[in-house]
């Protein structure tokens, strides 16, 4: 059985959502954040050296990194669901979004969180970081256009992966300039499997933060 180590209000919410979308049997272990720092508890280091979430145990292996976990679960357990066929025209687009979410889009969003914490000391960085956030959201908005989903206009695991980017952007109001992205996120939230994941793992409340 799959075993998900889930840190509340974190990137691991989308792995829980993925497992619910696929209807897989899994064990869920929930970890609270440190009440003072807001970071992951030290117990996660006993499972993986980085001590980060998500972590998924599958057939004796411990998998880390959201994109890698999603890719593995879909390939090993998806039975053709939530991903285009590898020989299809959409597959490279699907892989792009799996990697883009954490490889490119999240960096300026995380920096913007720390920038806000620094207050006036971060003023010299604000134009550059805010510009990069707008640049990435504009790119995503343009790629989505008027479609419902990012890959072939069919819901896929790429939408699950990309959801956290928009969740991280929303508290600052950055999505307000991109109404199609706000509607897209609401569409994702309306999925029954997303609602089940929230019921199981708790609400995703970043509060302007994007920690693991």
Image: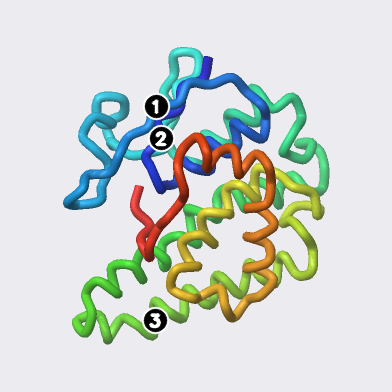
Residue at coordinates 57% horizontally, 71% vertically from top-left?
A: 137
Locate residue 149, reporting x and y percent.
74, 56
Q: Which mark is residue 128?
A: 3
Q: Secondary structure at mark 1?
A: strand
Locate residue 53, reporting x and y percent.
37, 38
- Specify the quadrant of the image occupied by residue 21: top right
Q: Which residue is mark 1?
A: 29
Q: Which residue is mark 2?
A: 6
Q: Nearer the viewer, residue 48 or 34?
A: 34
Along the polypeptide, which appears first: circle 3 or circle 1?
1
Locate residue 76, reporting x and y percent.
64, 23
Q: Secondary structure at mark 3?
A: helix
At label 2, counting other C-alpha atoms closer than 10 Å, the crowd grade (few under 14, some 14-19, many 20 or more) is many
Q: Nearer the viewer, residue 184 or 101?
A: 184
At label 1, counting other C-alpha atoms closer than 10 Å, the crowd grade (few under 14, some 14-19, many 20 or more) is few
Residue at coordinates 25% horizontally, 47% vertically from top-left?
A: 39
Q: CA distance from mark 3 to mark 1?
A: 39 Å
Q: Secondary structure at mark 2?
A: strand
């Amino acid at each position: 059985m799959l075993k998900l180590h889930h840190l509340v209000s974190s990137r691991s919410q989308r792995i829980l959502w993925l497992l619910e979308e696929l209807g897989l049997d899994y064990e869920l272990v929930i970890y609270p954040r440190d009440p003072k720092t807001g970071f992951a508890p030290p117990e996660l280091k006993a499972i993986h050296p980085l001590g980060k979430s998500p972590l998924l145990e599958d057939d004796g292996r411990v998998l880390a990194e959201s994109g890698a976990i999603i890719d593995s679960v879909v390939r090993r357990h998806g039975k053709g669901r939530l991903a285009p066929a590898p020989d299809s025209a959409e597959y490279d687009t699907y892989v792009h979004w799996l990697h883009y979410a954490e490889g490119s889009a999240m960096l300026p969003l995380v920096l913007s969180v720390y920038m806000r914490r620094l207050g006036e000391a971060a003023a010299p960085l604000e134009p550059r970081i805010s510009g990069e956030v707008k640049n990435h959201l504009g790119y995503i908005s343009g790629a989505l256009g008027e479609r419902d989903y990012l890959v072939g206009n069919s819901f896929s695991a790429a939408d699950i992966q990309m959801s956290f980017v928009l969740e991280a952007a929303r508290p600052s109001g950055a999505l307000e300039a991109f109404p199609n992205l706000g509607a897209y996120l609401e569409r994702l939230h309306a999925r029954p499997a997303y609602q089940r994941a929230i019921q199981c793992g708790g609400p995703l409340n970043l509060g302007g933060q994007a920690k693991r």
